[in-house]
Image (cartoon, rainbow, N blue to C red):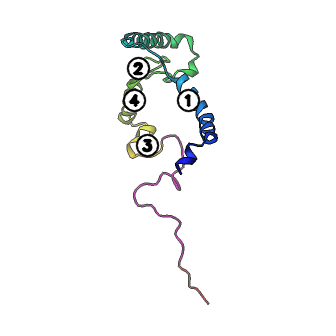
Amino acid sequence: MLNFFMNPIFLAGAAAAALPILIHLLSRRRFTRPGSHSSAVAELVRHEQEAEEALDGIEESAPKWMLNHRKDYETGEDIHLIGSDIDMRLRDEINIMKKIRSYKGIRHERGLPARGQRTRANNRSGLTLGVSKRREDRKK
C-alpha cells in the first residue's frame, strides 16, 4: 500500500491537483506587517465616516419614493431613518393609531391584518380547523 503512494506518477498527479488550490490560497492571503492593525482600524473609521456623510444628505439627494419613512406624523416631512430609529418610530405610530382608535389601530390591537388581507382561510390563530367533512351515511 505504501508503494502506491510513493509511485512517481501518483505524486505528480497529486501535485498537479493540489497546485491550483495552493495558488488560490496563497493569492487570497493578505500579507500584513505586524503592528499594522492601526492602519486597518483607521481605514474602517474612514469608511464609516464616508457612509455617515453619504446618509446625512440623503433626504435632499434621493427621490422621495426612495426614503423609508414618508410623511412623518409629527412634522409631515419625508425622512430617512437609520438603525433602531425605524423600530421606535413604527412602534410609536402604531401606539398613536391604537390611541385614536383608527381602523388600523384596532386591527393591530386584535392581532389581525391591517392592510385588507382576507382572514377566512389564512391568518388563523388559536384552535384551527381544517376543512370539516360531513358525516354521511355510507351505503355499501
Disc 1 residue type?
Leu
Residue 74 circle label: 2
Disc 4 residue type?
Asp
The percent position of residue 51, horizontal first and vertical second, equals 47, 14
Give yes or no for residue 125 being in the magenta stretch.
yes
Disc 2 residue type?
Glu
Mark 3, mark 1: which one is toward the viewer? 1
State the SS at label 4: helix
Mark 1, mark 2: which one is toward the viewer? 1
The residue that label 4 is drawn on is 87
Instruction: Give the CA separation, mark 3 to mark 1.
Output: 60 Å
Badge 4 or badge 1: first in the primary sequence? 1
State the SS at label 3: helix
**Residue drawn at 37 percent across, 27 percent down:** 88
Instruction: Give the CA separation, mark 2 to mark 4.
Output: 16 Å
Q: Looking at the rendering, which quadrant does residue 6 occupy?
A: top right
Magenta span: chief secondary structure: loop
